[in-house]
Image: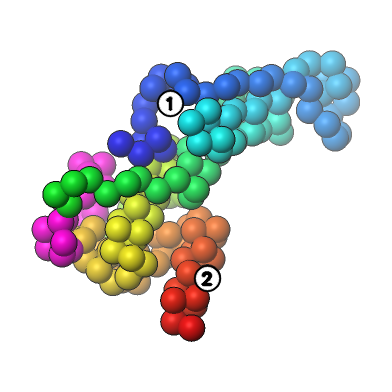
Amino acid sequence: MHPAALSEEELLKDVQIEQTRGSGPGGQHRNRVATEIRLTHQPTGVRGAAGERRQSKDNRRVALFRLRLNLALDCRAAPQSGAPTSPAEFCSSELWQGRVCAQKIACNSEHRDFPALLAEALDTLAYFEDDHKRAADALGISNSQFLKFIGKAPKALSDYRRRSKRSKA
């Protein structure tokens, strides 16, 4: 299972949590109270941080979401043995299947499920060697929906475009 798809409890087992004072505007509260949260996923070194909220619990929630998003963007799951060779043989997760309707994927980029879904889309794209048409077919959505979905994370789309330009050259 991709780290971005783990439950909060499972993910936090591998996370180092730092609580610090934030910098910038905010007056006495920001200068005196350690409300900024920095999370580091120990196995990968991927980080997520937040300090823009007044309460540390709110910053922790935002930092955890950012950590999951960064994990989705930076970590690719290794293909399993006996993996399918064609999109028709591919089986997406229950989470993904529950979000697909009429070849469209429905999930806002701010929703808590977004990082797990993005990780699955990017893992599928990597599995099919950056062929977005085969990846979209495997996930049961249209090509345009696939690109639109990964475009909700601009870094994911720009990384894909950079790789596809390199492979064409």
Q: Is residue 114 within the magenta segment?
A: no
Q: Which mark is residue 11?
A: 1
Determine whether 38 is above or below 136 in the image. Answer: above
Q: Secondary structure at mark 2?
A: helix
Residue at image point 41% right, 38% down: 4
Relative to 60, residue 150 above or below: below
Q: Amino acid at mark 2?
A: Arg
Identified by mark 1, the residue type is: Leu
- For residue 26, side relative to residue 162 (left or right): right
Residues rendered magenta in the picture: 84-103
Give percent across and percent down for residue 2: 35, 39
**Left or right: where does residue 25 sit relative to residue 94?**
right
| Nearer the observer, 42 or 113 | 42
User: Where, quadrant-wise, is the N terminus in this rendering?
Assistant: top left
Look at 65% across and 28% down and name the residue there: 38
Q: Nearer the viewer, residue 45 or 152?
A: 45
Q: On the rendered structure, is 157 left or right of 56? A: left
Secondary structure under the numbered disc 1 in the rendered image? helix
Q: Is residue 162 above or below residue 150?
A: below
Marker disc for residue 162: 2
Depth order, front residue of 75/154? 75
Residue 29: horizontal and vertical position, in percent? 82, 19
First of labels 1, 2 by sequence position: 1
Residue 152 visible in the shown view = yes
Q: Residue furthest left?
A: 89
For label 2, the crowd category at 10 Å Cα-Cα, with few meaning under 14, some 14 to 19 and many 20 or more, is few
